[in-house]
Amino acid sequence: MKQAVVAGLCAGVLAVAGPAAAQGSGSSGKPQGTVATAGSGQASGAQAGKQASSATALGTVRIPRAVTANGERLAPGTYRVRLTGEEARPEVKGQTPSLERWVEFLQGNTVKGREVVSIVPEAEIAQVAEGKKVPAGSSRVEMLKGNEYLRVWINKGGNNYLIHMPPASGQKS
């Protein structure tokens, strides 16, 4: 239910922003995490496959607890985050499709999980996220809304990338 509320908020902001905003969406909450400098790197080799040519390295993040990414368990650990060219489906009415895309969480050259990312231009982030903003070239991983979901927030290239994942089943707060 809360993800539907967040999605509705994102869709509303994007409808107001219009297609001129290169990319956008988001969430709000009080931070409980840490800030780290976003790293770089991109998977190579056969594992990367067809999407590597349209993928963009966003940085490296440490996930402190097990979460659910696209319905699958993603273990705690350090991951490289890669933005794919694949748009999230189904499309949300009134929303620009390129603003909701898939990211991959990689360890080495192996994709360990995937999740939808909401992309918000720097000029619009105040409309969708409360609290201290993530500095350019950095990332923050934080629990929000009473430990109901984990947000990975990466600020790179004039855009904010917001990924929301609930704790994995059986995970204690």
Image (cartoon, rainbow, N blue to C red):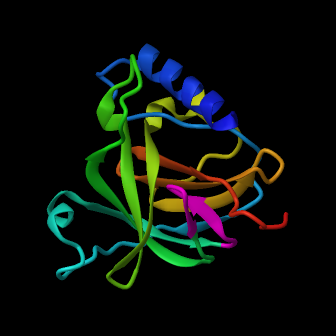
Q: Residue at x 66, y 70 (%)?
A: 66
Can residue 22 be seen here? The reply is no
| Residue at 79%, 54% in the rendered image | 147
Left or right position of 95 against 64: left
Number of labels in the image equals: 0
Counting from the top left corner in percent of width and height, residue 15 is at: 43, 16
Where does the image place residue 83, in percent across and percent down from the top left? 33, 57
Q: Is residue 44 above or below residue 135?
A: below
The magenta segment is 64-73
Looking at the rendering, which quadrant does residue 127 occupy? top right
Can you see residue 141? yes
For residue 120, above or below residue 39: above
Residue closer to the observer: 91 or 134: 91
Residue farthest along the bottom direction in this orientation? 108
Which residue is found at the position 28% from the left and 60% from the top?
Answer: 56
Residue 28 versus residue 31 in the image, above or below: above
Q: Is residue 113 magenta?
A: no
Quadrant of the snapshot with the C terminus: bottom right
Q: Quadrant of residue 48?
A: bottom left
